[in-house]
Image (cartoon, rainbow, N blue to C red):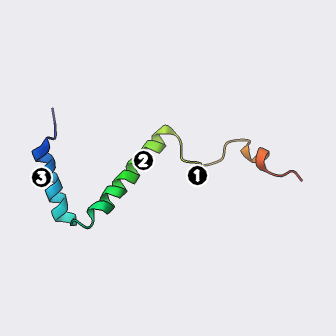
Amino acid sequence: MFGLRTPELLLILAIVVILFGANKLPQIGAGIGQSIRGFKRAMEGTDGGQGPEKPGASERTAPRA
């Protein structure tokens, strides 16, 4: 099937360095890492508590008047 070996990966890395420059590579890597983590979080169904609250959660935490 399709496999990437060392020569192919080095060629791809060289093309990326030529296109974006060596100074941008850490920023690109960080962006890709954040995207992958966000995708995994979305696939697991957890969003780190930033999504809508669970039903009944506001009733337990809200002060009664």
Provide the secondary structure element on which disc 3 rests.
helix
Q: Which residue is mark 3?
A: 11
The amino acid type of the residue labelled 2 equals Arg
The alpha-carbon separation of the residues under discs 1 and 3 comes to 40 Å
Labels 2 and 3: the sequence-earlier one: 3
Q: Which residue is mark 1?
A: 50
Residue 6 spot, x, y in % from top left: 13, 44
Q: Secondary structure at mark 2?
A: helix
Residue type, label 3:
Leu
At 34% from the left and 53% from the top, the residue drawn is: 32
Q: CA distance from mark 2 to mark 3?
A: 26 Å
Do the residues under discs 2 and 3 have CB atoms within 8 angstroms? no
Where residue 13 sits: x, y (%)?
17, 54
Q: Earlier in the sequence, mark 1 or mark 2?
A: 2
From the top left corner, tell me how far across and down residue 53 is, in percent: 66, 47
Q: Which residue is mark 2?
A: 37
Contact? badges 1 and 3 (CB < 8 Å): no
For residue 25, side relative to residue 40 (left or right): left
Task: Give the crowd class for mark 1: few <14, some 14-19, many >=20 residues within 10 Å.
Answer: few
